[in-house]
Amino acid sequence: MKFFLLTLLFLTSYFFAGVVSVQAKIYKCKGKDGVINFTSIPCGEESAAIKRPVRKIEFNKDGTKKSRKQMQAEKVKKEKEFLEVSKREREDKEKKRKQLEQHQNKVRKNCEAAKKI
């Protein structure tokens, strides 16, 4: 019995030791170019740090690189199109809801009229 309890205690302590979460420290470092980077390594130490995402490069149909203003304008245009489509979908859904409600009211009135006959 003692052996069983000791084995059980050992296994549970082993299990919980593996479950304990490890907290990583995050360091906020300002680079030489003035850009703030977040790394898991203290500032000034050499190691593999979190890489800054590479900026997306897009090209025009003629092969020239798109300017930031062009990309921003396209993004705004896509967002406006998305909002317009969403608005139309909401309006269609509301219209269908009203039609269904009118139909249900008509059926209800017809049922009440049929019960009276």
Image: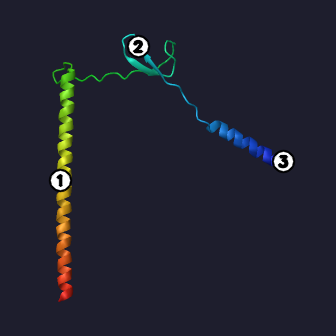
Q: Position of residue 61 (x, y in %)?
A: 16, 24
Residue type for callout 3: Lys
- Judge left or right: residue 16 versus residue 46: right
3 up-or-down from 31: above or below: below
100 up-or-down from 41: above or below: below
> Which quadrant of the structure image shows residue 117?
bottom left
Q: Residue, x 18% and y 63% (percent of image)?
A: 98
N-term mark: 2 or 3:
3
Label 1 element class? helix
> Which quadrant of the structure image shows residue 72?
top left
N-term mark: 1 or 3:
3
Near mark 2 (Cα within 10 A), the count class, few <14, some 14-19 or many ≥20, is few
Give the CA distance from mark 1 to mark 3: 72 Å
N-term mark: 1 or 2:
2
Near mark 3 (Cα within 10 A), the count class, few <14, some 14-19 or many ≥20, is few
Residue 31 marker: 2
Labels 1 and 3 touching (C-beta < 8 A): no
Residue type for callout 1: Glu
Give the CA distance from mark 1 to mark 2: 50 Å
Residue type for callout 2: Gly
Q: Position of residue 70 (x, y in %)?
A: 18, 24
Q: Which residue is mark 1?
A: 91
Mark 2 or mark 3: which is in front?
A: 2
109 up-or-down from 1: above or below: below
Q: Position of residue 96 (x, y in %)?
A: 19, 60
| Residue that protrudes farthest toward the top in the picture | 32
Label 2 element class? loop
Give the CA distance from mark 2 to mark 3: 60 Å
Q: Position of residue 33 (x, y in %)?
A: 36, 11
Q: Which residue is mark 3?
A: 2
Query: How many discs appear?
Result: 3
